[in-house]
């Protein structure tokens, strides 16, 4: 056991440093996202979701750096990543709308001017919607119309349509059934 530690001492030390640095970076980013979420009045669940996206990104980055620490050659990593990205690219092309909605959800977290409880009007030529925002999720907005109908509206479409604020904080506890 001691021989293994001595043989890979520098790799173990670099891996530990990488792990500590990534934990610190993750903590800083997650705390910043939570503060931005509180400042903009979004729900804590949305901030946690963005934190998960950051964590997954950092884990993938850590795996790449760890491969270099353990002695992988650039040509080997390039071959693996090009193969993986080819498969992912084909898969994401098949489900591009899901990726588009998730990306729109992240954009909406940082710059969407409306909050849960606001009454908005979406100016859609085919199906105009006037409703109260009940929830903002990763893939869609949950809207409640005046007649009680529940409407889910995709995040990528809400960023493409004109939206008018009808009433700020229009959601009251009695309207939720």
Image: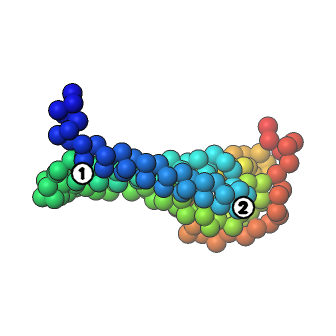
Total numbered circles: 2
Residue 94 image position (x, y, % from top left): 33, 52
Instruction: Decide if residue 40 is on the left or right side of residue 60.
Output: right
Residue sitting at 82 percent across and 51 percent down?
171
Q: Closer to the N terminus: mark 2 or mark 1?
A: 2
Q: Can residue 45 be seen in the rendering of this structure?
A: yes
Measured Cα–Cα span from mark 2 to mark 1: 39 Å
Please, what secondary structure does the residue beneath circle 2 have? Answer: helix
How far across and down, in percent of the image, does residue 40 sit? 70, 62
Q: Quadrant of residue 36?
A: bottom right
Occupied quadrant, residue 32: bottom right
User: Which residue: 83% across, 58% down?
Assistant: 169
Q: Which mark is residue 39?
A: 2
Q: Which mark is residue 103?
A: none
At 21% from the left edge and 47% from the top edge, which residue is drawn? 70
Report which quarter residue 107 is drawn in: bottom right
Graded by Cα atoms within 10 Å as few (under 14), some (14 to 19) or many (20 or more), the crowding at tag 1 reads some
Between residue 83 and residue 25, name the one nearer to us: 25
Looking at the rendered image, the disc whose residue lies closer to the viewer, 2 or 1, is 1
Whether tag 2 and tag 1 are in contact, CB under 8 A, the answer is no
Compare residues 72 and 94 and report the one nearer the observer: 72
Whether residue 94 is visible? no
Give coordinates of residue 3: x percent, y percent. Answer: 17, 32
**Where's residue 142, x and y in %?**
66, 49
Q: Residue at x 25, y 46 (%)?
A: 11
Q: How packed is label 2: few (under 14 Cα within 10 Å), some, or many (20 or more)?
A: few
Position of residue 154 relative to residue 165, above or below, is above
| Between 68 and 169, the one nearer to me in the picture | 68
Disc 1 target residue:
69
Q: Quadrant of the C terminus?
A: top right
């Amino acid at each position: 056991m001691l021989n293994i530690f001595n043989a890979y001492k520098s790799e173990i030390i670099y891996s530990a440093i990488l792990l500590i640095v990534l934990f610190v970076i993750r903590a800083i980013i997650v705390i910043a996202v939570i503060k931005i979420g509180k400042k903009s009045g979004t729900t804590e669940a949305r901030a946690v979701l963005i934190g998960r996206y950051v964590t997954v990104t950092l884990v993938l980055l850590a795996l790449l750096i760890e491969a270099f620490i353990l002695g992988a050659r650039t040509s080997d990593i390039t071959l693996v990543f090009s193969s993986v990205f080819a498969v992912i690219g084909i898969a994401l092309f098949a489900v591009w709308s899901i990726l588009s909605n998730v990306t729109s959800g992240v954009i909406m977290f940082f710059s969407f001017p409306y909050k849960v409880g606001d009454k908005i009007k979406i100016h859609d030529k085919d199906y105009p919607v006037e409703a109260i925002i009940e929830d903002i999720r990763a893939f869609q907005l949950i809207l409640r119309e005046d007649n009680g109908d529940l409407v889910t509206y995709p995040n990528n479409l809400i960023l493409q349509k004109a939206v008018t604020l009808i009433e700020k904080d229009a959601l009251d506890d009695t309207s939720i059934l």
